Amino acid sequence: MNINRRLFLFGGTAITAVVVGNLTPPTLAQTRNINLYSSRHYDTDDELYNAFKAQTGLGVNLIEAEADQLIERVKSEGANSPADVLITVDAGRLWVAEREGLLAPVDSAFLKQQIPANRRHPDGLWFGFSQRARVIFYNRDRVNPADLSTYEDLATPKWAGKILVRSSSNVYNQSLVAGLIAIHGVAKTRQWLRGFVSNFARSPEGNDTAQIRACAAGAGDIAIANSYYYARLAKSNDPVDREVVEKVGIFFPNQRDRGTHMNISGGGVFKTAPNPDAAIKFLEHLAGSLSQIYFAQGNNEYPVVPGTPIDPVVAGFGTFKQDDLNVAEYGKNQAEAVRLMDQARWI
């Protein structure tokens, strides 16, 4: 099956259109396909679309861009939008689409059966299809992992000048703080943020991979990042990347209480979807056994459906307890999280 990526301009921004099969833009809404707006920029996801076509005869027209750009595009397209499905990373971004009133509730017995309640919206507006753990990485020469414990402990004076983390504008960090608000409340989270930010080794810069690299280089003793970035480095053929993995260890926080903070990559059906039945079939496809393996192993993430095999490198990180907080809480607390992060001067 042919997969072609083409660039389009929307609002001055380049957006990639991907055509699976023999379907061609710009006439996106057709009888035998679904129109997918996605901010997951992973080539391995092509296997998901190919399998859907093979199983159902329905093709996938894919528009790729950042989540905010896709949401704005659908808003501007209005009732005539060709978009059927939104797929994006982080529950906080799904909440933005929810807040804008763009998503329709989906009542699917299969999705409810496959996806745990805490990894989907309570009213079926969106569903998680893969999970990512936001964990602590530590410089093996400088930190004894026995001294690591919880996210809360990172605000204590013993970590002064030792923490590496990316900007507060990053939605992964916003969701982490939003989760703490759900658990501890605003006052305690505000206090935690003051201590946490005061322990930064440097002003935030770079992405998650940059934090892990900086930790290996000794710019700080510990770093906060999603686990799959570390897996990518571990799988790399570049000796520089492999050296980073040798110097840096991975630690899953809060194993003696609620478990490690988890987020999702997920999606939902647009209210204005021209092909709603096919769109629901696509979501159900993503929750199926084969798709779950693609999700978990294609991007080194954790599956949402229990019992799905994970990548061997990821399995090597060990088993761990996951926080069972419903990820829908991240969106509810996102605005408050950003406000508190600004107050703490987390730039």
Image (cartoon, rainbow, N blue to C red):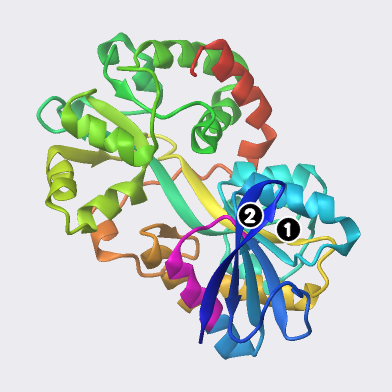
Residue type highlighted by circle 2? Arg
Question: Viewer-proximal residue, 141 or 64?
Answer: 64
Q: Are marks 1 and 2 in contact (CB under 8 Å)?
A: yes
* In this picture, residue 319 sits left or right of residue 151: left
User: Where is mark 2, residue-wise?
Assistant: 120
Q: Please provide percent x and percent y for residue 335.
A: 67, 27
For the residues marked 1 and 2, what is the alpha-carbon distance in whole angstroms?
A: 7 Å
Q: Is residue 319 above or below residue 181?
A: below
Query: For the point 25% across and 41% down, which residue is it?
Result: 250
Q: Is residue 168 above or below residue 283?
A: above
Residue type highlighted by circle 1? Gly
User: What element does badge 2 sit on?
Assistant: loop
Any part of residue 102 in sight:
no
Q: Please provide percent x and percent y for residue 272.
A: 85, 63
Query: For the point 43% across and 69% down, which residue is it?
Result: 44
What numbered label is drawn on residue 124? 1
What numbered label is drawn on residue 50? none
Question: Viewer-proximal residue, 178 or 64?
Answer: 64
Tell me where the magenta segment starts and ends, as one range: 38-50
* In this picture, residue 13 sits left or right of residue 159: right
Query: For the point 53% across and 18% down, which residue is it?
Result: 189
Q: Please provide percent x and percent y for residue 166.
A: 41, 29
* In this picture, residue 143 sits left or right of residue 306: left
Q: Is residue 124 above or below residue 209?
A: below
Q: Is residue 13 above or below residue 24?
A: above
* Res. 300 image quadrant: bottom left
Q: Report the residue that reaches farthest toward the left.
A: 141
Any part of residue 222 in sight:
yes
| Other residues around mark 2 within 10 Å, as few (<14) / some (14–19) / many (≥20) | many
Q: Please provide percent x and percent y for residue 56.
A: 64, 88
